[in-house]
Image (cartoon, rainbow, N blue to C red):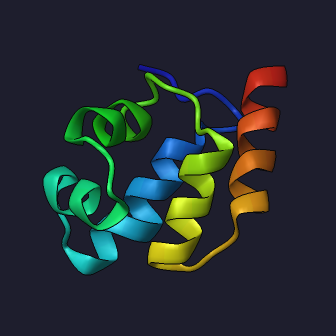
Amino acid sequence: MRMKNPPHPGLSVRHDCLEPLDFSITEGAKVLGVTRQALNNLVSSKAAISAEMAIRLEKAFGGGAKTLLRMQAAYVLA
């Protein structure tokens, strides 16, 4: 499958937040206080990142909520 350019922000969440800590989707969802399905949909590029999720990610893993939301906007507009 060819990757869309720019990539979905869920890929960044997987590579920059979950993988460095060796977190599963279940572990990441627990830290974020969301369902496993919600996080899985995000990192599988099946769901858009919401402002609420971006803030949860920023608080839990660092990084920037605004950056994630800009990535989502770029993905949608591409």
Image location of residue 52, percent across then percent down: 60, 48
Q: Nearest the camera: 1 or 32?
A: 32
Image location of residue 2, percent across then percent down: 50, 22
Kindly tell me whether residue 56 is visible in this rendering.
yes
Residue at image point 61% right, 61% down: 55
Determine which quarter of the picture holds residue 14: bottom left
**64 relative to 51, above or below:** below
Q: Nearest the camera: 17 or 6?
A: 17
Which corner quadrant holds the N terminus? top left
**14 relative to 22, above or below:** above
Residue at image point 58% right, 70% down: 58
Residue at image point 32% right, 48% down: 34
Image location of residue 31, percent across then percent down: 29, 67
Which corner quadrant holds the C terminus? top right
Residue at image point 21% right, 51% down: 25
Q: Nearest the camera: 56 or 17?
A: 56
In the image, 29: left or right of 48?
left
Image location of residue 20, percent across then percent down: 32, 77
Kindly tell me whether residue 78 is visible in this rendering.
no
**46 relative to 30, above or below:** above
